[in-house]
Image (cartoon, rainbow, N blue to C red):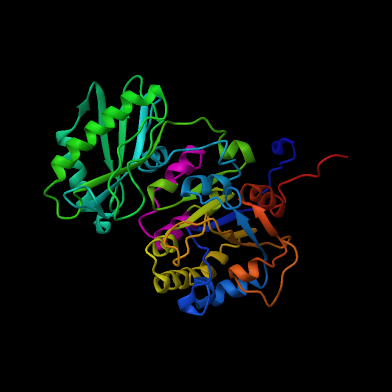
Amino acid sequence: MDLKEIIEKNDSKILLLVADGLGGIPHPEHGYRTELEVAEIPHLYELASKSALGLTIPVEPGITPGSGPAHLSLFGYDPVKHEIGRGVLEALGIGFHMTKRDVAARGNFATIKPDGTIIDRRAGRIPTEQSRKIVEKLQEHIKEIDGVEIILKPGKEHRFVLVLRGDGLSDKLTDTDPQHEGLKMLDPEPLSDEAKFTAEVIKKFVKKALEILKDEPKANGILLRGFAKVPDLEPFPEKYQLRALSIAAYPMYKGLTRLLGFDTPDAGDNFETEVKKLKELWNEYDFFYLHYKDTDKAGEDGDFEKKVKVIEALDKFIPELLELKPDVFVITGDHSTPSFIGGHSWHPNPLLIYSKYAGIFNREARFTERDCSKGYLGTIRAMDLMPILLANAGKLKKFGA
């Protein structure tokens, strides 16, 4: 069934708040409770007691997703069928216009030993301004390799974007980032004969970059992942007949939503400025994606107490968001990032849907993984969420006679 055949437009508004990496698992050092269970979050608990709850599976059971496929799934696209490399998302997120001749990669500055062993994959999360200067230094010295134009753009903190522009380039390459400290940087390996030339260009770039960075105290290494070209996707506004707005501070999430056809205004660099921008543009759209990054950062750092604190900080914004009177208010994560694991995981995400049509709710329920697992919505695929939101917003007609 083509969903567009039963979509009908109306003035109702859907607000999707994605607390990145929200979900956790019971931590043995904290009474076998999750961060959501320990946090003091009265507003989220009150909202949960009036909402339908459930869990979402980002990709497939047992599969740990990256942020790109996890978000793509939330927006109703099959992340396996429509695989998008991280490089494209980062490039689009910083406002870089990619062409069909481009291959982009997400870069991290890292701290490495003389033998190439990684001490810190994020170079101590160096400040954005410091990172920008290092990118400028690299770009000044590396402009072209074997006829391929080298384009470098700074991101936030330790992140940057590498774009190769030329003919005959391929994105079928393995990452140079081993994803863990204590390991050495990897060489990019071609996954097809067509990618051999591109792999050699990347190797030469990395060698030159390491020579230039050798005296940097923290950012003396680079890790590359998510080599990608621009894919073809049906725009979200056409797919769902919605005026869609993306409010996100981090480039990757802006990049994904820009690729899907969302409007992506500058929303500042923190959640407070994001909420301010949301209020400013509330009357101009009917679907709003609002991103909260701090939960994921704390989870990746393995910091249970910090993740609890940033969940509590998010809770304080809930009354302000409810004042906008969204017809459908959805709170979930793109993936789980348990601090007990210190990274993304395969565990389902807690899901809350607040609307007058949401369905059965439990006045005793709290917004926790445990209570969500008992919720009316059950455990669903994240890519099946959008039709449920459209239905709650009264945007779907009856199917069939």
Q: Quadrant of residue 305?
A: bottom left
The residue lying furthest to the right in this view is: 401
Compared to 99, does 162 lie above or below? below
Residue 12 as seen in the image, left or right of residue 303: right
Q: Magenta stretch: residue 165 in it?
A: no
Tell me: 149 left or right of 375.
left
Answer with the quarter of the image where residue 175 lies: top left
- Relative image position of residue 315 (x, y in whole percent): 50, 71
Residue shown at 14% from the left, 40% from the top: 211
Residue 146: tell me if it is visible: yes
At 57% from the left and 33% from the top, the residue drawn is 234
In the rendered image, residue 279, in percent from the top left (x then y), is placed at: 49, 58
The quadrant the C terminus occupies is: top right
In the image, is residue 291 above or below residue 91? below
Q: Is residue 218 left or right of residue 157?
A: left
Residue 96 can be seen, yes or no = no
Rendered view: 166 above or below 8: above
Q: Is residue 312 left or right of residue 131?
A: right
User: Of 114 and 22, which appears nearest the observer?
Assistant: 114
x, y percentage for residue 83?
51, 37
Looking at the figure, which quarter contains the N terminus? top right
Residue drawn at 31 percent across, 29 percent down: 199
The residue located at (39%, 69%) in the rendering is 303
Count numbered badges in the picture: 0
Check residue 271 for magenta coloring.
Answer: yes
Q: Which region of the structure is painted magenta?
A: 254-280
